[in-house]
Amino acid sequence: QKEVEQDPGPLSVPEGAIVSLNCTYSNSAFQYFMWYRQYSRKGPELLMYTYSSGNKEDGRFTAQVDKSSKYISLFIRDSQPSDSATYLCATSKGGSEKLVFGKGTKLTVNP
Amino acid sequence: DAGITQSPRYKITETGRQVTLMCHQTWSHSYMFWYRQDLGHGLRLIYYSAAADITDKGEVPDGYVVSRSKTENFPLTLESATRSQTSVYFCASSDFSRSYNEQFFGPGTRLTVL
């Protein structure tokens, strides 16, 4: 079992839809949870991070972590064609320099 | 140019040849990483380095060699390329100044081994 599982999709939605992207993880030692966004033929870039359980909101994006169920979510409200990308969840243990990535979910937002 | 750069961006080589992928960062970040990204596997860590002359294996190190004589450079060498090493390779760096260890990625090198 991989430490982080993510449905690779692909996911296709109409513009304006609410998008829900999810990951599960197996190691309870993970404390930091991140979402990276990767546009086609580009390197990933950090979109959001959360520490431990809870929600974090940034504009149209909300990151949610439920440590009791080991579930990580990213919600995108009012999705735009510019949100079309691959979204990768990532986790790390406290003090660790290494990140563990999910496989990524490819999202397409259709105008 | 400021940031993290990789060269070449595209490379085609033949089985058995030695190939070196270059990575250069201008931030003086202490940590540097090499990943490969393959369909169905996502990003997998090959090697990483905490500082000059300090390197360590990641998840998939076999067939790869790294060195880090200067903080800003972290080359990755495929000593004898195999078809299974056809992939997109990403270099990343981090200063680990934040507890959540944000990593900054380069644009990637697309390597094809024939």
Image: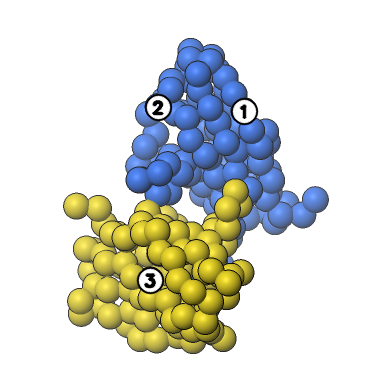
Tell me the amino acid under the disc marked 2.
Ser
Q: Are marks 1 and 2 on the same chain?
A: yes
- Give x and y (percent) for residue A67: 25, 78
Q: Which residue is mark 1?
A: B11
Looking at the image, is B77 positioned above or below residue A100? above
Label 1 residue SS: strand
Looking at the image, is B73 positioned above or below residue B100? above
Q: Which residue is mark 3?
A: A21
The chain carrying label 3 is: A
The colouring scheme, among rainbow, by chain, secondary structure or one colour, is by chain
Q: Earlier in the sequence, mark 1 or mark 2?
A: 1
Label 2 residue SS: helix
Looking at the image, is B102 positioned above or below residue B51? below
Task: Give the colour of chain A.
Answer: yellow
Task: Give the colour of chain B.
Answer: blue
Q: Which residue is mark 2?
A: B84
* Residue occupying image coordinates x 40% and y 64%: A11
The answer for how far apart the CA atoms under marks 1 and 2 are is 15 Å
Q: Going by the image, does A104 lie left or right of B108?
A: left
- Give x and y (percent) for residue B12: 59, 24
* Residue occupying image coordinates x 57% and y 19%: B13
Classify 10 Å Cα crowding around label 3: few (below 14), some (14-19), many (20 and above). Answer: many
The answer for how far apart the CA atoms under marks 2 and 3 are is 30 Å
Classify 10 Å Cα crowding around label 2: few (below 14), some (14-19), many (20 and above). Answer: few
Label 3 residue SS: strand
Tell me the amino acid under the disc marked 1.
Lys
